[in-house]
Amino acid sequence: MKDTVPDSYWQGFAQRWNRLGSPLRPCAEDVANFRKSIGDDPGRCLLLGVTPELAELSLDLTAIDNSAAMITALWHGRQRAIMGDWLEMPFAPASFDTIIGDGCLVLLAQPMQHQCFFERLARTVVPGGKIALRVFVSPELPETRDQVCRDALAGKMKSVHAFKWRLSMAIASESPDYIFNVAETAATFDRLIPDRQRLAAATGWRADEIETIDFYRGSDARYCYPTLSHAKKSLPPSLVEKEVIYGSYELAERCPILVLEART
Ligand SMILES: C[S@@+](CC[C@H](N)C(=O)[O-])C[C@H]1O[C@@H](n2cnc3c(N)ncnc32)[C@H](O)[C@@H]1O
């Protein structure tokens, strides 16, 4: 993963975490939907990443993240946190009853990484075990960069975070593998909406909220926003789709929880 999202990126991300909001961070409705998908007693649970909002979903939880900066900034000694790569998974087969994660596919932006990721999950969970992942997916019918910016200037979006995602997904949809450089989101914003005061007046967004788009500026990190159907193509036969749960917040249709079960 280091060639896709360098650790220096996560150091900056950790410092800025508190300035980010839904849909990037899971909201109370997402947490409730995770709970619905894995139940009240998920047993030995593996959390992919150190998303604090998901830390209470099991009394027996282990987090795995490959960034020391993110573990230090977000975890604060909650339960066990292990530094490791989801694509390697330093655990014996069937070590966990449940696996959960928020937005993980976004960060696996090399060809073949999604397949490898799902195969590792299938091996790490017990047969019959549940895997619940909130996935950030581009719409099956793509939008254009211009359309998204026009909608923002027409005041049709509630949150600046939803705007950033729609713009990023419009860019991702231009590539057959849905992979893009996040710096392109900031560059497109500068080009199509050069007047931030006009955007603030149209939307009611504060200047410091709009500035969160600058986090992406100059970054060499690459993200992947596949469509749901594209993402499902990477599932191995050992994983069965159980359900897809949607929330009701802005852009929730692009942030469902994909619930899988390992075949017995
Ligand atoms: C769980 S994800 C998504 C969190 C948030 N919802 C978002 O979209 O940014 C972010 C975390 O994944 C970690 N991460 C990214 N790729 C990883 C990998 N291959 N193995 C382990 N951790 C990884 C990063 O260090 C970061 O802490």
Image (spheres, rainbow, N blue to C red):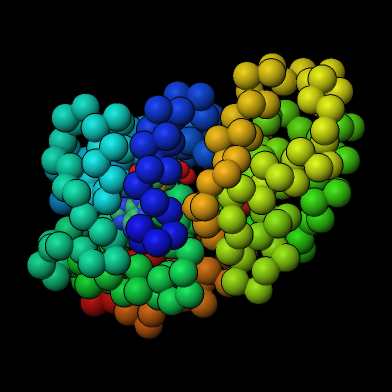
For the point 40% across and 61% down, which residue is it?
3
Residue 206, picture quadrant? top right
Q: Position of residue 165 (x, y in %)?
A: 64, 44
Compared to residue 19, the image places residue 215 above or below, namely below
Q: Position of residue 56 (x, y in %)?
A: 26, 33
Residue in front for this viewpoint, 33 or 255: 255
Spot the residue most to the front. Answer: 218
For the point 79% across and 25% down, which residue is it?
196
Side (left or right) of 175 relative to 24: right
Q: Position of residue 96 (x, y in %)?
A: 17, 58
Side (left or right) of 66 relative to 176: left
Q: Is residue 135 visible in the rendered structure shown here?
A: no
For the point 22% across and 72% down, which residue is it?
123
Q: Quadrant of the C terminus?
A: bottom left
How many numbered circles does the render carry?
0
For the point 80% across and 51% down, which residue is it?
145
Residue in front for this viewpoint, 113 or 54: 113
Spot the residue most to the bottom. Answer: 237
Compared to residue 169, the image places residue 30 above or below, namely above
Q: Is residue 94 visible in the rendered structure shown here?
A: yes
Residue in front for this viewpoint, 167 or 93: 167
